[in-house]
Image (tube, rainbow, N blue to C red):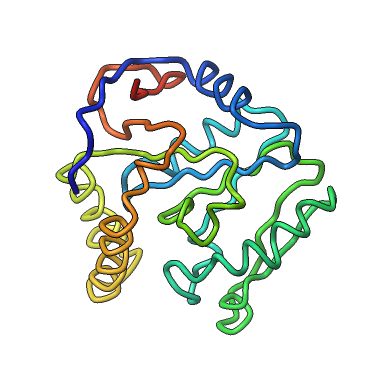
Amino acid sequence: MIAPPWRWSVVGIDALAAQVLGAVGPQAPAVVAVDGHSSSGKSTLAPRLAGALPAAAVLHTDDLAWNHGVFAWDVLLRNEVLPEVRTGRPVSYRPPGWVRHGRKGSVELPGSLRFLVVEGVGASQPSVADLVDVAVWVETDEPTRLARDVVRVVENGEMSPDDYASWMAEENAYVTATRPWEQATFVVHGGRLLDHADDQVVLAG
């Protein structure tokens, strides 16, 4: 992956949220996609950003994709989840893979959302680009990402090595083909490129 030579600066998470607010219209919920490679820091950024936005909740694409397909969750978001969210009522959704494989529980989203933060690999993929109001790309150097993946795959056993290799093949093909950072509204660094506090992010300018 060849990314631009971004110039980075440290800003408060509230400042980033204010920029997101300024980038969307009055529609509710506004969809904020937090995209990036596996282990780039998306699932860390997403709840922090949602916490700084009014009436916001996080939807993890991993939940929609569970036993369904790395990127095939797009249809579920478009046809099943978003229509329910837009009614303004709370959502309790069981993705097809959960039903087929007997996974307990459901995806829970509160009602009256102003922002839905959709977090995951491919959150801004072309098939859902028309649904996304703001796209955030989380950029993290490959050695950092791979070191985090070792913890997730080898130490924590979140997936088998074969499943991981299959997932990464699809992920890398997606990133290579679409270069999502080029369409992103904001680019945030997911590593420790610059020292910053927990209530700050490293933002590309």
The image quadrant where one finds the C terminus is: top left
Residue 35: image x %, image y %? 42, 47
Question: Residue 24 versus residue 106: which sits nearer the camera?
Answer: 24
Question: Residue 140 versus residue 161: which sits nearer the camera?
Answer: 140
Query: Residue drawn at (61%, 22%), measured in percent from left and top?
Result: 22
Residue 4: image x %, image y %? 22, 34
Where is 125 relative to 35, above or below? below
Tell how many labels: 0
Question: Residue 104 versus residue 55: which sits nearer the camera?
Answer: 55
Query: Residue drawn at (32%, 31%), measured in percent from left and top?
Result: 189
Q: Position of 158 compared to 169: left or right?
A: right
Q: Position of 72 compared to 130: left or right?
A: left
Which corner quadrant of the image does residue 75 belong to? Answer: bottom right
Q: Position of 44 compared to 155: left or right?
A: right
Where is 169 relative to 56, above or below? below
Query: Residue drawn at (28%, 20%), measured in percent from left and top?
Result: 8
Query: Residue drawn at (26%, 39%), measured in percent from left and top?
Result: 140
**Farthest left residue in view:** 143
Where is 94 relative to 108, above or below? below
Residue 196: image x %, image y %? 33, 17
Question: Residue 52 versus residue 72: which sits nearer the camera?
Answer: 72
Residue 62: image x %, image y %? 48, 61
